[in-house]
Image (cartoon, coloured by chain):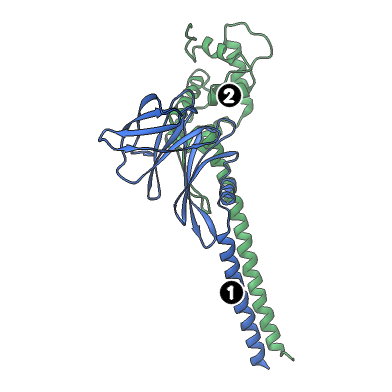
Amino acid sequence: MKKRITVIIVTVIALLTIVSYLMFQWLNDNQDIEEAIEQEFRTLRQYVEDVYAIEYLDDDRALVFYSWDFPVFYNFGVMELEKTWRGWQFVESISNRIEVENAWVKGVYAEITDYVILRGPMWAGIDEIEIITDDGREYRPEIGRAEWQMWYLILEDEPFEEATFILYDSDGEVLREEVLQFDLNWPE
Amino acid sequence: MRVSLKYKVLIILVLSVIIGVALYYYGTKARQEQATGEALKDYSYIAREYALDAIYKSKEFPVEVELYPSAYTEAILERWKAISERYPELDYPESAIEARDWIEVHKAFEDTDLLKDVIRKMYKDATIAYEGLGGSYITLLDYIFYKKYEPSNMEDIVIDLGIEPPREEE
């Protein structure tokens, strides 16, 4: 009798464990990253935010580019999320105050976990940006649009302190050239 | 199936311990979540008001957020300092600012009666004529934090008092 009860209890526990694991896996695989991002903003208490882009570094890591602080949205942030057994989870977030004003393009340097990120707001009429560094490297940063427009570059090689930004309109014409400087020692 | 009294007592004891541990765990977790939420709310408010850069390293208990002044923070502090130099009752907490203890820094604005007194004196000391009720303490905060003048005539007041330079002629 006792043996039968033990077998039943062990079987029930084993079944519950397997079903819970499968359900966790299923929920994890089907989790909507946008809902996860919204949840992270809620817990960060950064209300009324605007997401410009979600950049997947690999299957389990993503960077979210956003700005917050209604009504001006001058706090430009980047947040790293990692997919764990609990779903998408917050890793780190950096928020920089950049007042857009009448500038063509602005930018800041930041390091988030293992990545160097350059990013900033830009004027709405800019369609494409070409970055040329003093040592001749060229980059085409991504552009995200929401309340403002944000360019961003995930740098995989050496960071640079200064670069020329060539700003193009939608016809491919050069609108302007701007030289931006980056403080590589930020935040110290 | 008959279960002996010894087993019954044992099961009740085990269940009591499990329930006790669970209650303690969830109670502690709830308190930590509340403290975490309050701390993050404060950081978000302070970062916004003082135009600070922020690095959120942990948003779980214990919260780890680093705040750094931006170029816009410096402008806020300059306006605050200029008013404090003329009206020293509005404290400018130099040491807390240097220590970057922004939560402590913001305590200078807790006493609204003091702020009302400062703005009243500013309007009284100004030599320009104005109509209406003058500024409220919100007018003072709007000027310091956002350099926002509307809907008051605060711009004329701060220029008249020499806190801001005169307007450039177009």
Rendered residue at 48%/28% (across/down): A99
Q: B50 or A24, which lies in front?
A: A24
Q: Is residue B157 visible?
A: yes
Q: B139 or A95, which lies in front?
A: A95
Q: Which residue is mark 1?
A: A18
Where does the N terminus of chain A fall, quadrant-wise?
bottom right
Q: Which residue is mark 2?
A: B142
Judged from the image, the secondary structure of the residue bearing numbered disc 2 is helix
Q: Quadrant location of residue A139?
A: top left
Amino acid, disc 1: Ile
Instruction: From the top left corner, tell me how far across and down residue A151 is, in percent.
Output: 44, 36
Judged from the image, the secondary structure of the residue bearing numbered disc 1 is helix
Amino acid, disc 2: Asp
Q: Is residue B56 visible?
A: no
**Horizontal placement of A26 versus B6: left or right?**
left
Supply the letter of whichever chain is blue.
Answer: A
Q: A159 or B77, which lies in front?
A: A159
Supply the letter of whichever chain is green.
Answer: B
Query: Height in image: A89 above or below A146?
Result: below
Q: Residue furthest left?
A: A135
